[in-house]
Every structure is written in C-alpha cells, then in structure tokens.
Image (spheres, rainbow, N blue to C red):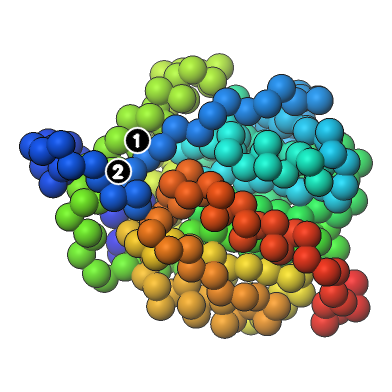
C-alpha cells in the first residue's frame, strides 16, 4: 500500500533537471517551491526533557505572554521550520516549539516509532513546563500528532490547527502530480539532510531516521471515524490547493469526521504551504487562536 512517504520518495529520485523551468529563465510557481525559513528568534528559554528513552529539545518564546501554543513540525524536519510563524505569534502568545524524537536536536530511540509515542512526548514536555493546556499548530506529521492529542488527551488541548494531515493510510492522491512538482521532493530531502547534519548529535543517522519514518508511514496513522468523532477542541483542518500527497477528498472527509472542525484550503500553495505563503498561513492560524472562545460539546 502506498503512502505519502512513498510518493515523496518517488519525487525524491526525480532528476532535478527535468523540472519544466530548468532549461528556461522561468521561475517555478509558488506551490512548487521549497523556501528556506528565516532563523528563529532567540528563545527566552530552551533545553531538553526526557520521555520514553528520548531526549527532546524545546524552546519557549513568551515575550507577548498570552495563552500557550505549541508548534509541531513535519517529518524529516525540525522546529527550525517555524522561522516564519514564531515571530508572528510571540506578540500575542507564549510560543513553544519542539523537535520530534530522532529529528532536529532530539535523540531517539526512533524504532518502533508511533504517533501515540510522539503525542506522549508533547504531553511530557507540557508537564515539564507546567503547561496545563495549550493550543496545537501542527504541519503534516505535527498535524497528525495534534489529532492524536485531541483524541487521547482532550483535557490538555485548547484548539487544534492541523495542516496537511492524514488520518489513515488510504490518503494518497490518485491524481498525477503537477509537472512543476518534479524534483521538489529531492530538493526538500536534500535540505532536510543538511539541516539534520547541522543540528543532530548523531549527524550521520539521517538515513536511519528516514527509514524509521518510512516504516511509520507504511502502517500509520489509523485513526477511526469513532475516534475522530470524539474530538471536542475547536479545530481547523487545512491544506494547500496544490497538495501533492494527500487526496483532497481525504482532507475534506477528515474535516467532516471531526465534529468541531472547519475545512480551510489556502490557494496557490502545496504541502509546503506554511513556508510558501507564511502570511496566509498565519492569518488562518490567528483566526483560530485569537477568535472568540466558545464552549465545546464537552463543556470544557
């Protein structure tokens, strides 16, 4: 069974010279780019917490105070991917970022890797920082972790913004990718490997980390409609107009299965939308986080 990882790996072996703009001066469309985020601001606090044998890196930015929000990155990446979003949020929120186990500055073990385990890592960090309740903004894997948190730890979750998340392994888009997307996967993986070598205490373990994530994606997530139906936190299920890995129908179904969810599609971006159009991404996040607080069906 194919998953979005296998689609990513297929793209990764595409020869970059085959990209339609390679032989011309034509710039690729926005949704076919892999922008580099700016460096994160200096945190007010950073360090490591341990959980399940992993040493997990975190950073806290609380210049603006306000309700806490935790940003969770996508697979192969790190908290450095939030360089656009953190400066936009720290004026109104306490912002917390972390590196998922085995990625960025965090260590393993990464096998067996599960979304439940990574969700427990988030809760362990919240406990260590004495954060009783927080909103989650997650991209790709981070969005899936957010869904697991909303299901299994509802008392810890305020609001959820899940970007580019799938809820089972039947999510692959059946549409052929746009020609302009050829080579994008290879560029992304090349950048993520360079970032891993820069940040990790085990810089030569990127292939092992990729393999562990591949095993994860082959079998997970497996969230059921009944589980998704128990989510009570106000939720936005978001994705890009040119999402290349997850079928649009799957994203729409996910939004329907979560009782408190709103579906949002940002135009002219793909799976990498948070980096491709950070202003539009932030507007969507802020609309959820800063909107009026409403009582959810559980009464919390």
Name the image quarter holding the N terminus: bottom left
Residue at the location (71% across, 31% down)? Answer: 58
Q: Secondary structure at mark 1?
A: helix
Question: Where does the image place residue 32, in percent across and percent down from the top left?
Answer: 30, 48
Residue at the location (47% across, 72% down)? Answer: 251
Answer with the quarter of the image where residue 152 lies: bottom right
98 or 127: nearer the viewer: 98
Near mark 2 (Cα within 10 A), the count class, few <14, some 14-19 or many ≥20, is many
Question: Where does the image place residue 243, in percent across and percent down from the top left?
Answer: 37, 61
In the displayed structure, would residue 143 be above or below residue 28? Answer: below
Res 28 seen here: yes
The residue beneath circle 2 is: 185
Answer with the quarter of the image where residue 81 lies: top right
In the displayed structure, would residue 241 be above or below residue 34? Answer: below
- Marker disc for residue 189: 1
Answer with the quarter of the image where residue 17 lies: top left
Residue at the location (68% across, 69% down)? Answer: 235
Asked if residue 124 lies left or right of residue 83, the reply is right
In the displayed structure, would residue 21 be above or below residue 261? Answer: above
Badge 2 vs badge 1, beta-carbon distance below 8 Å: yes
Near mark 1 (Cα within 10 A), the count class, few <14, some 14-19 or many ≥20, is some
Q: Report the Cα–Cα distance between label 2 and label 1.
A: 6 Å
Q: Secondary structure at mark 2?
A: helix
Residue at the location (83% across, 58% down)? Answer: 156
173 or 276: nearer the viewer: 276
Question: Where does the image place residue 114, in percent across and percent down from the top left?
Answer: 56, 51
In the displayed structure, would residue 154 be above or below residue 90? Answer: below
Res 15 seen here: no
Asked if residue 133 lies left or right of residue 100, the reply is right
């Amino acid at each position: 069974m194919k998953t979005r990882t296998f689609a990513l790996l297929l793209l990764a072996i595409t020869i970059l010279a085959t990209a339609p703009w390679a032989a011309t001066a034509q710039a690729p469309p926005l949704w076919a780019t892999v922008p580099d985020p700016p460096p994160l601001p200096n945190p007010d606090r950073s360090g490591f917490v341990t959980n399940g044998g992993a040493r997990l890196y975190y950073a806290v930015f609380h210049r603006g105070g306000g309700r806490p929000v935790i940003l969770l990155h996508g697979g192969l990446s790190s908290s450095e991917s939030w360089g656009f979003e953190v400066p936009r949020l720290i004026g109104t929120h306490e912002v917390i970022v972390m590196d998922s186990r085995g990625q960025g500055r965090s260590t393993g073990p990464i096998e067996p890797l599960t979304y439940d385990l990574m969700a427990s890592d988030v809760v362990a960090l919240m406990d260590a920082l004495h954060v009783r309740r927080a909103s989650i903004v997650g991209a790709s894997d981070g969005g899936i972790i957010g869904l697991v948190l909303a299901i299994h730890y509802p008392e810890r979750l305020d609001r959820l913004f899940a970007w580019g998340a799938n809820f089972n392994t039947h999510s692959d888009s059946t549409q052929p990718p746009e020609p302009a997307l050829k080579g994008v996967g290879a560029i992304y993986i090349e950048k993520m490997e360079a970032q891993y070598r820069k940040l990790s205490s085990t810089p030569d373990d990127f292939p092992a980390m990729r393999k562990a994530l591949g095993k994860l994606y082959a079998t997970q997530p497996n969230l059921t409609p009944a589980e998704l139906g128990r989510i009570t936190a106000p939720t936005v299920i978001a994705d890009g107009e040119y999402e290349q890995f997850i079928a649009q129908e799957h994203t729409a179904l996910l939004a329907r299965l979560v009782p408190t969810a709103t579906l949002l599609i940002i135009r002219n971006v793909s799976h990498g939308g948070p980096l491709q159009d950070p202003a539009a991404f932030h507007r969507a996040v802020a609309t959820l986080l800063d909107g009026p607080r409403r009582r959810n069906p559980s009464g919390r």
